[in-house]
Image (cartoon, coloured by chain):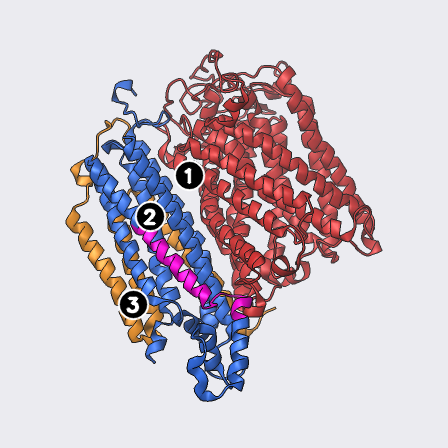
Amino acid sequence: MSIVIADEPRTAPPPPEPAVPVRNYLNNNYSVWSWLLTTDHKRIGILYLVSLTLFFTVGGIAAGMVRLNLLSPSGAILTEDQYNRMFTAHGVVMLFLFLIPSIPAVMGNFFIPMMIGAKDLAFPKLNLASWYVFMIGAGFAVWAVLAGGIDTGWTLYPPYSSRYSHTNVTPGVFGVFITGFSSIMTGLNIMVTIHKMRCPGMTWGRMPLFCWALYATSFIQLLGTPVVAITLTLLMVERVAGVGIFDPTIGGDPLLFQHLFWFYSHPAVYIMIVPGMGVVSEIITCFSRKNIFGYKAVAWSSVGIAVVGFLVWSHHMFVAGISYYSAILFSFLTMLVAVPSAIKVFNWTATLYRGSITFQAPMLFTLAFLVLFTVGGVTGVFLATLGTDIHLHDTYFVVAHFHFVMVGGMVLAYMAALHFWWPKMTGRMYSDFWSRASATIIFVGFFLTFVPQFVLGYHGMPRRYPNYPQEFQVYNVLSTAGASVLGFGYLLPGVYLTLSLFFGKKASANPWSATGLEWQTPSPPTLHNFDATPVVVCGPYEYAIAVDQMGRGLPEPPGPGSAGDPASHFGPTGPCGPIYKETEVVG
Amino acid sequence: MSKPDHNKPDDPPTMHDVDKPATLFAVYLVVLGLAVANIMLSVAGLHNLALPVQLGIGTVQAVLVAWYWMHLRRGDQVVTLSAVTSLFFVFIFYVLVLSDVLTRWRGGL
Amino acid sequence: MSASTHSPVLKHHFDNLEQQHSAERLGMWMFLATEVLFFSGLFVAYTVYRYLYPADFEFASSHLILWIAGLNTGLLITSSLTMTFAIRAAQLGDRPALLRHLLATAALGSAFMGFKAYEYATDVEEKYVPGPMFQAEYDRAVEELTHAPKDHAESHPHNPAWDLAARNLGKTYGDPGFISPQRVQLFLCFYYVMTGIHGIHILVGIGCILWLVQQTYAGKIPPENYSTVEVVSLYWHLVDMIWLFLMPLLYLAGAGMKSH
């Protein structure tokens, strides 16, 4: 249904600011055990946040070492063995210990129950167990990559990994295997919660798109992760027993490992990106003060990505020796996944159209996501195309594509989510200036790091090589320079977010004037999220009529210099007078 | 949508939900009988039919167990959906892996 | 949500028991979906190799101990029956019957594992283990059979490696009817990994059932909380169902070979 609403005085008054409760989830109990034995989904989200920040730092340092080494054509600081271990450490830590748990485990744990009006996730103890399982697995993996290292690359292909590598493959694989269970637990919890715990009135069509995205993610986690678990088990058996089903000397097929591995690990990149898309849907509506364009399309495209994502894995194996026929089939199927991704990008862009956009840090990160994800997605089509992939396979083009999607997409979405929900999680506002500066620096640094890698890859520099011909040096130096800018950009939030905990302005319940249920409780939230079970009466993004999901008015949205800046007043005016908003009402 | 009714009192299970022993025993005898039949037929030699017959019997047994003993017949839609979804993805897994393995002898890159 | 209707087994974050039970059931079913995918990795790999090496797999399968497989199948199906009766007893609030059925299930599962252990021990004794053990025995058998007179066979050990060597005598790789000892080992990898992982699942299941026994003793399974028993039973049935596929794939693949 499409309605046109003039910007008249709003009818629904904003609710009074909820009284700040004496007890919230943070100050209820300060003891260490109250954190380590908590079953509160909010505290578990914070536990994950702290752990993931640590692993992100470890993975980031490894990335820095790799980039530093590539400054010189013959390797600047590392031996070739050390280099192999370093890029493996970067891959294993960033993928399995940061990207996969990132938004589902931190933001999903924290906000899914609040967004659907529940008191907790369906299985709180399982949720806590997932964190412990994650930490045990992560402990193994980090120990393996730091003490001695693994030199197989994160993809762990046999027979190198099973027979020839003399590094810590077994403990590393065991660690990854264990963290997989944590991923399954989180996914299962979120999925059951969304099915069974929605508050009255929260129909599927009124659920925030973040919940849809996390639902699709959990779907992949549940169906994909067990396959990599059995694959890694078989790999460990083969390595420990000296005989196994991927062993070519007894008739085993190493390509079968790749099939089994990528059956999970390709959908796993959608575990990483789809939650980011959910975040973007939340933020882009809020900061352009508009309803989402095409709610159903965006919601179902998440599910579409989750399903189609399972059909495309063999594009990682085009030049590995699979049959022509299979390769053609997978090339076609891979291109299909561009359809739901493009649906999302077009809908977000249409959401921006004629919105009253403000550029706070969450929105800056989100806009950066839009640009970088689109570049990453489009270059993915080059790799899906069988002919071009033969040229580009295993070059820096792949590295650049992957980082555009994973860093430009997912990490920026994670940063956006962190900045968007930080006031709710901690009750404090961070520095407006420094957060915008950080978003800008990260965006610039990112481009400088990875655009040269597209050029390098196109000219044939293979990935994972410590050495390269002299004429590639200029691009490598550019890329390393960009990585330093990027690293600086990542350090800034570490500083100003930490400072905000102590010196930040107290955040109101709804500092961004957003519509979701999570903003209807005080910041930081009370112990059981809501004093009374909320009742939902309308869709998730009714910014056009300025009501939240409970049908109450929204407070004044923030703007840069809300006093005096005509563009930031509610009721946007264009050159020709008041702007009319065309919008879609859902739910 | 099978949303739980929030006003429903916390009743103990009604007799409707409790299995009849006769049903359970009947299923038991059929499943056990199929297992015996499977072994006897295989030992007698099924030649080319061995794999389809053996897996067919296994499927019938699994369906009986799921339907009667795992109460799929009383499960809500989402439960049925998760069961069917897992099988669907196993199917995809088979088809796409075999698309490579069965045609690889014709050549590849 | 008035406090008066609250049962002691209702957890704080659920509105009512109906919601709690359906969440628990759904959670377990979703976990079972992951289990199905977990085993499907093995089944897919098995399918690929069975397609590539049918004769070798059938030969290897024919030397597994069929009577143990048959007996174990019966034990598992019976244990599933007693588990279902345990749900019934829990629903009816019949504690002695609940305990009886749970213990029977655990006992049947343990018997399954006992026979499994006996089978593994026999296999190891016959050197029917992939890797150097089988290969060395096979090489020794080939060596001795090549140099021994033809009518000397009954004095040799009767184990799969010797059977294979006798069968392959005079043939080399690529000849029709030649069974590759390496691919027999490939089958054995599947045999040990599949039954091993299945056995671990049985052990976990027995653990869960014993936990239920303890909960029942402690009086924590009143009729309105029967879903706890049901959730464990779902897992137990799935492990049973997986066995119903493992059994034909591993033990029955070569069962017809002896009749030829």
Camera-nearest residue between C182 and A537? C182
Q: Residue at x 59, y 18 (%)?
A: A428
Q: Nearer the viewer, mark 3 or mark 1?
A: 3
Residue sitting at x 30%, y 38%: C213
Q: Residue B39, which numbered label?
A: 3
- Dominant SS of magenta comes to helix
On the rendered image, what quadrant is the N terminus of chain B found in? top left
Q: Is residue A511 visible?
A: yes
- Image height check: is C109 above or below A411? below
Secondary structure found at label 1 = helix
Q: Position of residue A61 (x, y in %)?
A: 71, 39
Kind of residue at badge 1: Met
Chain letter for the orange part: B
Please tell me whether mark 2 or mark 1 is closer to you in this view. 2
User: Compared to A71, does C218 lie above or below?
Assistant: above
Q: Which residues are magenta?
A: C108-135
Gap in angstroms between the C-alphas marked 3 and 2: 23 Å
Whether the residues at callouts 3 and 1 have beta carbons within 8 Å, the answer is: no
Residue A196 point in image, percent of width and height = 35, 34
Q: Which chain is blue in the rendering?
A: C
Dot 2 falls on which chain?
C
Tint applied to chain A in the drawing: red
Q: Are discs 3 and 1 located on one and the same chain? A: no
Which part of the image, by quadrant, shows the C terminus of chain B? Answer: bottom right
* A120 or A125: nearer the viewer: A125
| Residue A512 visible in the current orientation | no
Residue A191, labelled with which disc?
1
Q: Which residue is mark 2?
A: C236
10 Å crowding of disc 2: few (<14), some (14-19), many (20+): many
